[in-house]
Amino acid sequence: MQMKNITRSRHLFAEACRLLPGGVNSPVRAFQAVGGDPLFIAGGQGSKIFDVDGNEYIDYVGSWGPLILGHAHPEIVDALRQVLEKGTSYGAPTEREVELAFLIVEALPSMEMVRLVNSGTEATMSAVRLARAFTGRKKIVKFAGCYHGHADGFLVQAGSGALTMGVPSSPGVPEEIGGLTIVLPYNDGEAVERAFEDQGEEIAAVIVEPVAGNMGVVPPAPGFLQKLRELTAKAGSLLIFDEVITGFRLSYGGAQEYYGITPDLTCLGKIIGGGLPVGAYGGRKEIMELVAPAGPVYQAGTLSGNPLAVQAGITTLRYLRSHKESIYPELTKKAEILQDGLLKAAEDAGLRLQVNRAGSLLSLFFTEFPVTDLETAGRADQGLFKGFFGLMLQEGIYLPPSQFESLFLSVAHTDDDLKRTIDAARLSFKKLGEGRA
Ligand SMILES: *Cc1c(COP(=O)(O)O)cnc(C)c1O
């Protein structure tokens, strides 16, 4: 096989490593878990990205979730161009913020009020502060392998890059802060029940990814989210859905609509910024009115509600809203085609593979056992994933460079893209199977 020429990416990475820790501005981009040097990207169009050496790839990272409409969607590009000519930031309210807030609360009725921030991390961090203020309690429950951004209290058995790099519990987090986080296994309703029996009166909130997407995709077991709803309500704790991935992805109304569960607070990010930095948190009015300046819980942001970012979000949500009857079934259909094709190809190559999927979110685990939590995710063969990733990249398929991340489909992925991906997987699985024989 002719290896792709990535000379310029290699050169840039060497330079970057002198100037940026690990050569990147977010850990999982560094390809550390899969070996090799990361590609430097020069552009994207639809379902494709192009590296600085001129290679083309079918992209399944989609900037880690935001790009549900694909790269450089013409409506977003046009809308941004118009905003740009009127200035990029005022630090004063704009009409657009009202419109984005309206679109969000309309789609997720549990969010009666919303605060816009700049990232998912800000959203989750602020939601926990608010939950603590509202309940007057200190402890939070999170689940092992879930990722809620990089605020101190969440970097305890965290997923995503923290898991990929082997630092799920980060140095620099004081044990006094980490000690306020109760970590339980995902999908283990009984463990949550016991935690509430022991310390229910101290628990401010349970925060959960309603579909875990940061230890690979792990859907909730039947009844798990319901159980969280019941236990928190009974104990006077808040249920926080971290829908930074699932919001406007699993369905237009997110996981809460998809599974029919109403959380107290919701965190959003990724899609609501349409590829620019936006996050949001919101919930019932009585809780949200504690946020400054309506109330005493402080939270602010120089660039919060930034005109360009908010416009990218509005254009994305408007597009999804007017096409939702077709978009969500079609995205799911594409994910099913991929899932079926990958499973069949792995079977033909004699490899044991699980493909976990919820809606258009999916990920691969090289194991014969079902993956339902962090422990079972950790039993998958990471060496095989690494080999698979490298082979697929040579075939022009850009997968998330980690076992513990979701593939993200967009409306721009075509049937031909899916077919090419499955053909490439067939070839790669065969090589991996032969390598092991
Ligand atoms: C990406 C992500 C975050 C953090 O969002 P950032 O914008 O990267 O800070 C939080 N929660 C979940 C579930 C995520 O996937």
Image (tube, rainbow, N blue to C red):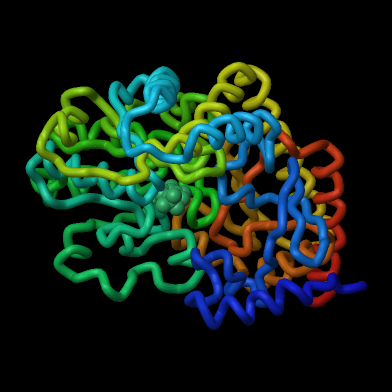
Report the quarter where the N terminus lies: bottom right
Camera-side residue of 253 and 93: 93
Q: In this rendering, would 22 be left or right of 305?
A: right
Q: Viewed as shown, does residue 86 lie left or right of 334? A: left
Side (left or right) of 384 relative to 91: right
Residue closest to the eye, 425 or 413:
413
Picture coordinates of residue 69, whole percent (x, y): 65, 35
Determine the residue located farthest toward the right in the rendered image.
1
Residue 191, can we see it?
no
Location of the C terminus by quadrant is bottom right
Q: How many marks?
A: 0
Which image quadrant for residue 66? top right
The vertical placement of 80 against 284, above or below, is below
How far across and how far down the image is residue 323, in percent? 64, 19
Give the residue displayed 38% in from the left and 61% down from the top. 158
Residue 61 on image: x %, y % = 64, 52
Determine which quarter of the picture holds residue 266: top left
Judge left or right: residue 310 versus residue 337.
left
Residue 261, relative to residue 380: is it above or below? above
Q: Residue at x 58, y 57 (%)?
A: 369
Residue 272 appears in the picture as rendered? yes
Residue 348 higher or lower than 279, as above or below: below
Determine the residue positioned at 62% across, 51% down.
Answer: 363
In the orientation shown, which residue stands out farthest toward the front?
A: 86
The residue sitting at 35% across, 36% down in the picture is 116
> Where's residue 217, x and y in %?
54, 49
